[in-house]
Amino acid sequence: MRFEDAIGGTTREDLRRTGGPFLDRAPFTGTGFAPAGTAVPVWWLAPTRVPAGARLVRFADGLPPQRLADYVDVATGWVVAGGDGRRRPAQPSPLVGGYATIAGEHRLADVVGDRVAVWEPATGERREVALADVDGIFELEVLGSWNGLDVRLVARWEHDGVPMSRIAYLGHDSDLAEGLGLVKIEAGVYEASVPDAQIDAVRTVVSLVDDGR
């Protein structure tokens, strides 16, 4: 998971003063901290897959935290809390998250302790491999340009025979993103679904991941 300090402001003058690239709307401050009673740091998280072992918890005023589901790994997906074992089948995007190289083949995978959970695309099944038997772990990024904006492709599919991609804006300028019709998912996060034909300069970047061995 890669983070950037959210430094910038709500105006161009703020950007010149702070030297940061993030132009966003209030209550964003651009100081790198949330406008709260205590110093709460704020980061921008680059597009990533949910990490193995993550937990979804609901917090509400006057109520104890409620555990909703656990994300076991890329091959298992979400398991609903409550003991009934219900789960949402894993349907991971091949464009986000870690891969393992095993016997010369590449598979979406998560390192869990000294084991690697692998998702088999042909069957959707989960299998485990000893970390010692894995040749390497890497992350794949597919980057491009859409209407002059730097974007990352995070999913692909076909709609009525037209290749489509979900793109995530890698810049931090809300004026540009909103002016071009990108959808604001949350603070500083803009996405859109567009035809592949509209994406220019597509390229792939492979980054090796330290697996702790």
Image (spheres, helix red, strand yellow):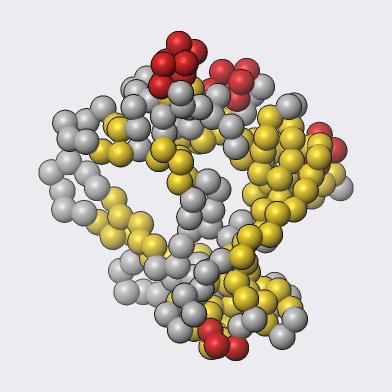
Give x and y (percent) for residue 85. Answer: 40, 75
197 displayed left or right of 49 = right
User: Residue at coordinates 47% horizontally, 75% vertically from top-left?
Assistant: 212
Give x and y (percent) for residue 24. Answer: 46, 23
- Outermost residue toward the left in this view: 62
Residue 102, quarter of picture: bottom right
Q: Front-most of 88 and 171?
A: 171
User: Residue at coordinates 45% horizontally, 84% vertically from top-left?
Assistant: 114
Q: Front-most of 140 and 79?
A: 140
Q: Front-most of 88 and 187?
A: 187
17 displayed left or right of 174 = left
Say whether residue 54 is visible.
yes
105 displayed left or right of 175 = right
Residue 30, quarter of picture: top left
Give x and y (percent) for residue 16. Answer: 47, 16
Give x and y (percent) for residue 124. Answer: 64, 74
Q: Front-most of 37 and 76?
A: 37
